[in-house]
Image (cartoon, rainbow, N blue to C red):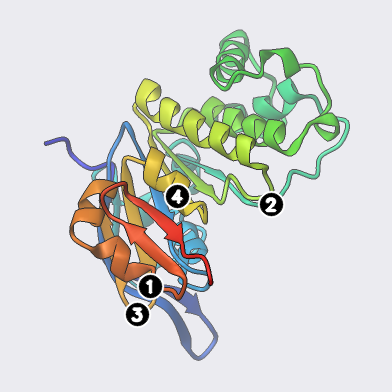
């Protein structure tokens, strides 16, 4: 069996105040592997964003260990992390008068410095990243002229240009219409396969994640984190138990949720 890219053991996440600690989630143990798309699912307030920020080293763990590529996360320098983990956040890009090519080129900043000049090999990497997400025709467009779906592809291309083995995405399909959501999910799954990268994303698009993701992490403050393939979680009854809501039932045979009509 392949070695995990990321392994977390007995992780507790939260925020440290001056005199206290606010715990968000406790005792999380799970693994992420290269060449897989893993989706983090859970209700609002479950701690998905806090977990992503902790795995990205934006927040320190309250307790527990995070190992990335065989080394504890806390032992990496900021410069090393910039070449290890790429992050795509939920917030819309509010940049103007910058071309797609220039924004994707910022992904090379760990190697050139923020104001560094791109060398020929950097430009080739940027060009390849743009091609991989299918936006070559947009390379000269200004960011403010793009649709939300196109902007999200640009941010994914920027993460690819960063050449990290790990990419984290926080709600990458938020603000998108349904066809764009499907396109982004399919793109991320394809990229995980073709690049061998570990791609981990949080999402509220439950049914879509069950159809496309290789692995699912189900997160709840009370129930903790359950992991497995969609099929494994369906067969164990985990999905049916996890999302117990009036008017919603889980079809384990087809691995999908159904909305019950009121009479």
Compared with 194, 24 (above or below) is below
Q: Mark 2 against mark 4, which lies toward the viewer?
A: 4
Residue indicated by mark 3: 222
Q: Residues within 10 Å of mark 2 (few under 14, many from 20)?
A: few
Residue indicated by mark 1: 244
Q: Disc 1 or 4, which lies upstream in sequence?
A: 4
For the residue pair 163 and 155, the one nearer the viewer reads as 155
Q: Position of residue 193 (x, y in %)?
A: 35, 25
Label 2 vs label 3: CA separation?
Answer: 28 Å
Identify the secondary structure beneath mark 3. loop
Label 2 vs label 1: CA separation?
Answer: 30 Å
Q: Disc 2 or 3, which lies upstream in sequence?
A: 2
Compared with 211, 232 (above or below) is below
Identify the secondary structure beneath mark 2. loop
Residue indicated by mark 2: 91
Find the residue positioned furthest to the right: 97
For the residue pair 153 and 55, the one nearer the viewer reads as 153
Q: Mark 2 against mark 3, which lies toward the viewer?
A: 3
For the residue pair 159 and 239, the one nearer the viewer reads as 239
Residue indicated by mark 4: 207
The number of callouts visible is 4
Q: Disc 4 or 3, which lies upstream in sequence?
A: 4
Compared with 243, 67 (above or below) is above
Q: Disc 2 or 4, which lies upstream in sequence?
A: 2
Q: Mark 4 against mark 3, which lies toward the viewer?
A: 4
Can the viewer see residue 9? no
Label 4 vs label 3: CA separation?
Answer: 22 Å
Label 2 vs label 4: CA separation?
Answer: 23 Å
Whether pointer 2 and pointer 4 mark residues with C-beta atoms closer than 8 Å, the reply is: no
């Amino acid at each position: 069996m392949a070695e995990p890219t990321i392994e977390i053991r007995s992780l507790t996440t939260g925020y440290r105040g001056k005199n206290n600690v606010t715990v968000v989630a406790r005792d999380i143990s799970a693994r992420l592997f290269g060449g897989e798309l893993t989706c983090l699912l859970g209700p609002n307030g479950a701690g998905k964003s806090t977990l992503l920020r902790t795995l990205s080293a934006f927040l320190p763990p309250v307790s527990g260990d995070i190992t990335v590529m065989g080394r504890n996360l806390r032992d990496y320098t900021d410069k090393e992390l910039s070449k290890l983990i790429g992050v795509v956040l939920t917030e819309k890009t509010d940049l103007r008068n910058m071309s797609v090519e220039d924004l994707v080129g910022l992904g090379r900043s760990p190697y050139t410095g923020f104001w560094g000049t791109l060398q020929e090999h950097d430009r080739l990497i940027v060009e390849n990243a743009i091609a991989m997400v299918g936006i070559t025709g947009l390379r000269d467009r200004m960011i403010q002229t793009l649709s939300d779906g196109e902007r999200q592809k640009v941010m994914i291309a920027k993460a690819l240009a960063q050449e990290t083995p790990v990419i984290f995405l926080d709600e990458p399909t938020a603000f998108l219409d349904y066809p764009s959501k499907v396109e982004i999910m399919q793109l991320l799954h394809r990229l995980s396969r073709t690049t061998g990268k570990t791609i981990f994303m949080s999402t509220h698009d439950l049914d879509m994640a069950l159809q496309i993701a290789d692995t699912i992490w189900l997160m709840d403050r009370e129930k903790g984190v359950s992991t497995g393939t969609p099929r494994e979680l369906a067969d164990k009854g985990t999905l049916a138990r996890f999302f117990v809501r009036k008017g919603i039932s889980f079809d384990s045979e087809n691995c999908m949720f159904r909305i019950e009509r009121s009479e």
